[in-house]
Image: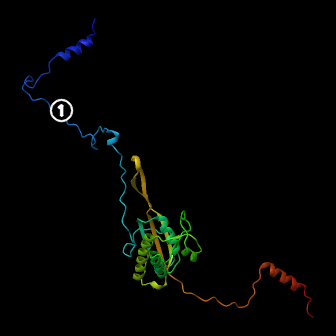
Amino acid sequence: MTCPLFEFFQLGLQSPVPSIEQSNGAPPLAPPAQPPRYSPSSHTHQRGPAKFFRSSVHRAAVPPFVFTTPSNQQKMVRYAAEPAPSAKSAKTRGDYLRVHFKNTREAAQAISGMNLQKAIKYLGDVKEHKQAIPFRRFNGGIGRTAQAKPFGATMARWPVKSAEFLLGLLKNAEANADVKGLDTAALKIAHIQVNQAPKQRRRTYRAHGRINPYMSSPCHIEIIVAEEDEAVEKAKETGVVRLNARQLGRKRLLESRKPASA
């Protein structure tokens, strides 16, 4: 006894497929248009093979080298410190700078509190390897040099690229101060700070088909220069001896024990 379902499928396979001439003279219906396989507008998005489908990370474009000038100081730009007399100071900053954070931090620490003209000359000497930048915090694997002795350190280097970026910012701060009418010879670096920026990712191709990250460490730099206060000589002591509470109590006790004069 055969299965009726099997006979039904067998009859369907034996029936001839109607040709174009047999179909009432009407052209055959075209198949419905299918959306592209990888189109974002496709309702049924199918993932292809793994070797042909790789995820891509979309990152925001890194803004260029940005200086703060008097024309754009009105924008919402925050600094980590604000000088008390803003009329006697000038600011500058650079964001997302393609220069190593650690080297730039050490170079900025070396010129912190220094006179502006002296700092410009010092960084120029660093570029020519006449003076060195002492490395105090990020000093892993830093070699020793005799040029670190004037700073009370033993490890120092010559970060030329960091010196170039800092020189550009210092000259921009000097120009901003000149626009304000400040005495550029009396300016000192009142505030300088280096912050880490988002790391940028690249690839390096190794042996045996391996791929390793090749990261960069950019940074943000902000500088505030201000006029130095005039040096005032210390007032001469008038000879008045100041006593603390214990000494005053002892003095009163001794005075009370003295015999009363007749």
Please tell me which residue lies in front, 55 or 175.
55
Q: Name, please, the residue furthest toward the bottom.
A: 262
Q: Secondary structure at mark 1?
A: loop
Q: Position of residue 56 (x, y in %)?
A: 35, 49
Q: Residue furthest front?
A: 207
* Residue 210 visible in rendering: no
Residue closest to the eye, 58 or 251: 58
The type of residue carrying mark 1 is: Pro
Dot 1 corresponds to which residue? 31
Vertical placement of residue 93 versus 211, above or below:
below
Q: Quick check: 37 above or below 253? A: above
Q: Quadrant of residue 66?
A: bottom left
In what quadrant of the picture does the C terminus appear? Answer: bottom right
Q: Say which quadrant the N terminus sits in.
A: top left
- Left or right, 47 with respect to 17, comes to right
Q: Residue at image x 20%, y 14%?
A: 11
